[in-house]
Image (tube, grey):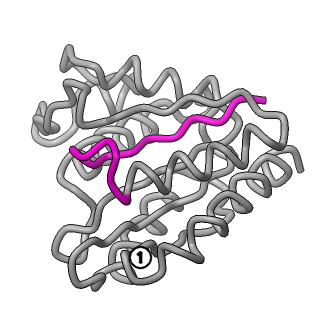
Amino acid sequence: MRVVAIQASPNVDGLTSTGAQRALEGAKAAGAEVELIHLRKADIRLCLACDAGWGKCRDEGVCVIEDEFEPTRQKLYAARAIVLSTPVYFGETSEIVKAFLDRLRRCERGAKERSPLPNSAVLGIAAAGGSGRGTVSCAQMLERCFSHLGLRLLDILPLTRWNRDYMLPALEEAGQRLVAFAQE
């Protein structure tokens, strides 16, 4: 079984990335093959809202923008479970996560029954540095998006510098449980 984690912070050693890595450590301990994607290192552009808002994404489930969106999407297709770890910016996901998820939702709507993504298991992480505020509203955004994509939600966990000491072990356990959840 394969678990892919997307971490979306520019800081590859920060809270967001550490949370994703700990979840993957748990998944690996449960026997999964794991991969960590640093989304900020990928060339993911904003949706162009082609053809009055819907282009090939609606009709064919593909995006016309030639960047690293489709290869990243294919990695999700190859996985049975996904971890998405986003920094919390102003109570929302990061801009790169928003751009990626906006395009993914549009393309998945057009892909319909051809997509292996629906029913994949997912674990969300909302990582707020600084004040630690905004994790709840960010988690709500993630939950809506996961629902639109038809993903099976294990959990969305808040991670802050204030709860880091007990949440990192919890994320490792969540990674283990994600593997079992994906196999149900």
Quarter occupied by the N terminus: top right
**Residue 51: where, in percent of width, then height?**
12, 32
Q: 10 Å neighbourhood of mark 1: few (<14), some, or many (≥20)?
A: some
> Left of 166 or right of it: where is 41?
left
Quarter of image, res 45: top left
Against 38, residue 90 (above or below) is below
Against 19, residue 141 (above or below) is below
Residue at image x 50%, y 21%? Answer: 74
Count of number-bearing discs:
1
**Residue 79: where, in percent of width, then height?**
65, 30
Farthest right residue?
184
Residue at image x 53%, y 75%? Answer: 165
Q: Nearer the viewer, residue 138 or 10?
A: 10
Q: Amino acid at mark 1?
A: Gln
Residue at image x 37%, y 60%? Answer: 15
Q: Nearer the viewer, residue 176 or 110?
A: 176
**Residue 64: where, in percent of width, then height?**
22, 18
Against 46, residue 125 (above or below) is below
> Left of 180 or right of it: where is 22?
left
Residue at image x 37%, y 39%? Answer: 104
Q: Nearer the viewer, residue 5 or 102?
A: 5
Q: Secondary structure at mark 1?
A: helix
- Is residue 121 one of those drawn in magenta? no
Mark 1, residue position: 140
In the image, which residues are magenta?
Answer: 1-15
- Is residue 3 one of those drawn in magenta? yes
Q: Nearer the viewer, residue 65 or 174?
A: 174
Against 64, residue 77 (above or below) is below
> Left of 160 or right of it: where is 90?
left
